[in-house]
């Protein structure tokens, strides 16, 4: 019987060098070589599909290149960036996106946490309820957009039909300035509240039971327990869920495309939808690249600030 | 003493080697992705098609089209496979379709890649300028001279579906180059409820509005009008352009490339006022995002007194399975009438329809087959068969033939409308111009902007697009 191979060691290098090479293994391909060989395909794919397009977009953002017109890409310095940052059109889309992100993510956080809190207090049927609540999240946003478009149709939609049966008037959900943006927020909330709920539920399940037991011995009220035990312990996890959702919502495109096409007028055009128009209606590739790079920068900066706040919270 | 090599740490020289390798990989990726740069340096101009059709292949071949998803696309594929195969048994016709909203993007992103999975692009007439300027489609001028009887067409139809630079309304420049040939003619028809407003269609725009107003008041639950208002494709823009034309307005001065002061002149303002303040109140609530299908649905379900739609998309209205107006085609036709658009200050109608254009990036054998198909399609006998199959031909003899006039109740409307047609701007900036007009007209129709502000914004923004060619940076904003 051979000696058992140690699972861990303080000197892994020594163990590795002491082990004789496996029979048939090339002497020139050491552990390091093997590691490189295994990760190279992934690295190459990453370079080709992620790093290169990003660097190429960065290069194009300083040019007046157009994908359809061909011809050379003339260097124009920060011309595209200046034009984007000073454009009234971009400011309008940025405001629309901000309202959308705050509205949708705020609503999803409140609802998601609320549902998770209620589910966590149940002892029976928790798994079934959680699965049912997760269904919207599993659907494609295009499919969600299409069936909500039918449901919100002012003439034939089921939502107005229900309102009618309650004696309320017809609402033009998708063709009026205020209701169109509200509809986008509602549909996004319907689809993505389960995401917040899932993360909040994980946080709530992880709260140690003995804290509640100690609180009940002290006859602490329900509100006191929630405020001083539940919320502080779930809060950091909830903030991470909010971060993910905010980044997703910031680059919203599909729901806008299907539900309102940016209308009425341009009142529900988000930044991503505007980039699509710049990139594909006039094929202004240079401008669209700069626009995309700026959006990435905004996300990175805001995320960094947010993470710093999270770290402080953790340290506190 | 020899120290064992530590895992996880690399010497300075090793790090340099890795960095150099990573840099080389990045450069290699860049070079591979960018190709040899020939594409970028290629001069943007349309390559010429041969004047005579070269020898056709005897091998099996699929001739691919690209169009948007609507009934004529299915009709074309069925018709071409049934008829063209009689002469070219090795050829199969495939009409690839995309949603209407993605039509322009689907074609031009492939053009941008200099590689297309289609041989014949069915372009909207206004796309020609963009495709020609970018060198995406073949110049057919010499081919047409040798193979097509141009005298058999209304000159404007040839010009609208193939000529660049753009033709003036109703005229063709004999010396201009041709880049396409007509595939499907189209214009708007007025669809009216004979049982609600009478057998005789309104003759003027004012009469039409009055008739719709009365019909709406007399028939609760039925709206007076239904027309395109959506902000996608060219929906709301065509609606405004139609009313603009009828009220004597112009979209631009093509010679001076002036839009500001032309589209928003007194006639333009009056047209916008009529559209927003007189026509819109007669439409159904929430119809601000309606396009072809929604207008047809409203007519088929008996919810509109008068509607406007493209003729090529109106065939489904006579299908009893899709209609609540009758259980047979005859019963439906007892209630529905089709007429040319009413006139007011002018009798202009919008030009619709599309032409066939050969992709510059298609294989030579497929380009040859495409030219042969186009020559075949434009023959007098084939145009009549196309008419009988539900298509809208462009040859005058086919338009006046019983095969066409008896094929649908709206075909006479098309034949009568041909001399009255007006197109939009056929310039490379079309996609952006139409987007500006669509979004602003849609905003005015849905209360997001005042009509005058919307029209002034259209004029200002469109002029900005035409004037921005020399701008450094920010193109497209």
Image (tube, coloured by chain):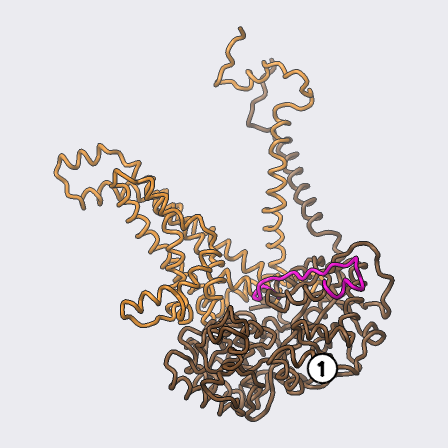
Residue lying farthest bottom? B345
Chain B colour in the picture: brown
Residue drawn at x 59%, y 42% as measured from the top left: A46
Question: Is residue B69 among what the camera can see?
Answer: yes
Which chain is home to disc 1? B
> Is A249 placed left or right of B27 in the picture?
left
A24 or B322: nearer the viewer: B322
- Which residue was labeled with disc 1? B401
Q: Quadrant of residue A61?
A: bottom right
A215 or A259: nearer the viewer: A259
Q: Secondary structure at mark 1?
A: loop
Q: Which residues are magenta?
A: B81-103
Q: Position of residue B256 (x, y in %)?
A: 66, 84
Chain A colour in the picture: orange
Q: Is residue B475 above or below residue B176?
A: above
Q: Quadrant of residue B153?
A: bottom right
> Is A252 placed left or right of A29 in the picture?
left
Residue drawn at x 66%, y 37% as measured from the top left: B21
Q: Is residue B289 above or below residue B213?
A: above
> Is A161 placed left or right of B56 in the picture?
left
Asked if the stretch drawn in magenta spans residue B82, the answer is yes
Q: Position of residue B37 (x, y in %)?
A: 74, 55
Q: Position of residue B80 (x, y in %)?
A: 72, 65
Residue drawn at x 54%, y 56% as measured from the top left: A293
B418 or A5: nearer the viewer: B418
Question: Is residue B256 among what the camera can see?
Answer: no
């Amino acid at each position: 019987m051979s000696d058992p191979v140690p699972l861990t060691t303080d000197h892994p290098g020594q163990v590795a060098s002491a082990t004789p090479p496996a029979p048939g293994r090339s002497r020139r391909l050491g552990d390091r070589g093997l590691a490189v060989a295994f990760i190279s395909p992934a690295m190459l794919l990453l370079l080709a599909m992620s790093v290169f397009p990003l660097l190429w977009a960065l290069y194009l953002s300083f040019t007046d290149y157009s994908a359809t017109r061909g011809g050379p890409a003339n260097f124009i310095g920060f011309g595209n960036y200046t034009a984007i940052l000073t454009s009234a059109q971009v400011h309008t889309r940025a405001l629309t996106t901000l309202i959308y992100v705050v509205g949708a993510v705020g609503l999803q956080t409140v609802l998601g946490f609320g549902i998770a809190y209620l589910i966590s207090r149940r002892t029976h049927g928790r798994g079934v309820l959680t699965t049912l609540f997760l269904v919207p999240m599993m659907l494609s946003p295009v499919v969600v957009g299409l069936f909500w478009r039918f449901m919100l149709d002012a003439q034939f939609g089921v939502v107005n039909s229900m309102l009618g049966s309650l004696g309320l008037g017809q609402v033009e959900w998708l063709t009026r300035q205020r209701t169109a943006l509200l509809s986008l927020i509602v549909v996004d909330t319907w689809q993505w509240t389960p995401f917040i709920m899932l993360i909040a539920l994980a946080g709530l399940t992880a709260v140690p039971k003995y804290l509640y037991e100690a609180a009940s011995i002290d006859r602490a009220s329900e509100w006191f327990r929630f405020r001083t035990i539940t919320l502080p312990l779930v809060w950091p996890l909830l903030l991470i869920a909010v971060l993910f959702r905010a980044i997703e919502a910031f680059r919203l495109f599909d729901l806008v495309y299907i539900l309102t096409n940016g209308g009425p007028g341009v009142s529900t055009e988000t930044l991503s939808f505007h980039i699509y128009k710049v990139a594909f209606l006039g094929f202004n590739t240079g401008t669209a690249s700069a626009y995309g790079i700026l959006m990435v920068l905004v996300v990175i900066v805001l995320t960094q600030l947010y993470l710093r706040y999270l770290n402080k919270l953790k340290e506190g | 003493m020899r120290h064992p090599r530590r895992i996880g740490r690399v010497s300075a020289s090793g790090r340099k080697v890795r960095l150099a390798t990573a840099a080389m990989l990045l450069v290699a990726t860049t070079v591979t992705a960018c190709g040899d740069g020939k594409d970028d340096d290629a001069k943007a101009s349309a390559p010429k098609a041969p004047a005579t059709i070269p020898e056709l292949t005897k091998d099996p071949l699929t001739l691919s089209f690209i169009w948007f998803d609507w009934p004529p696309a299915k009709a074309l594929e069925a018709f071409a496979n049934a008829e063209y195969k009689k002469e070219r048994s090795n050829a199969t016709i495939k009409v690839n379709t995309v949603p209407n909203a993605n039509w322009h993007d689907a074609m031009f992103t492939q053009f941008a890649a200099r590689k297309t999975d289609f041989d014949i692009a069915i372009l909207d007439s206004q796309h020609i300028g963009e495709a020609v300027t970018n060198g995406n489609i073949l110049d057919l001028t010499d081919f047409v001279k040798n193979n097509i009887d141009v005298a058999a067409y209304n000159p404007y139809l040839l010009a609208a579906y193939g000529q660049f630079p753009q033709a003036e309304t109703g005229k063709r420049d004999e010396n201009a180059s041709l880049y396409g040939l007509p595939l499907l003619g189209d214009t708007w028809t007025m669809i009216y409820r004979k049982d609600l407003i009478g057998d005789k269609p309104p003759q003027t725009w004012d009469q039409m509005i009055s008739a719709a107003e009365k019909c709406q008041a007399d028939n609760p639950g039925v709206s007076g009008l239904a027309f395109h208002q959506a902000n996608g494709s060219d929906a709301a823009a065509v609606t405004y352009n139609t009313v603009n034309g009828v009220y004597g307005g112009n979209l631009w001065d093509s010679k001076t490339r002036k839009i500001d002061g032309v589209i928003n002149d007194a006639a333009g303002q009056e047209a916008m006022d009529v559209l927003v303040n007189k026509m819109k109140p007669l439409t159904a609530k929430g119809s601000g995002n309606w396009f072809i299908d929604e207008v047809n649905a409203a007519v088929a379900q008996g919810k509109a007194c008068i509607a406007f739609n493209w003729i090529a998309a109106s065939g489904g209205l006579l299908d009893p399975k899709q209609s609540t107006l009758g259980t047979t085609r005859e019963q439906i036709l007892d209630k529905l009438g089709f007429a040319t658009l009413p006139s007011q200050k002018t009798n202009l109608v919008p030009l619709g329809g599309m032409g066939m254009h050969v992709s510059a990036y298609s294989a030579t054998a497929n380009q040859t087959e495409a030219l042969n198909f186009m020559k075949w399609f434009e023959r007098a006998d084939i145009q009549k068969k196309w008419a009988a199959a539900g298509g809208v031909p462009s040859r005058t003899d086919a338009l006046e033939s019983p095969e066409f006039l008896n094929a649908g109740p709206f075909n006479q409307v098309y034949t009568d409308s041909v001399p009255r047609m007006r197109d939009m701007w056929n310039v490379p900036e079309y996609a952006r111009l139409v987007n500006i007009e669509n979004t602003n007209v849609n905003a005015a129709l849905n209360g997001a902007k005042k009509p005058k502000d919307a029209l002034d914004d259209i004029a200002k923004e469109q002029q900005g697009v035409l004037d921005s060619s020399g701008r450094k940076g920010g193109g497209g904003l």
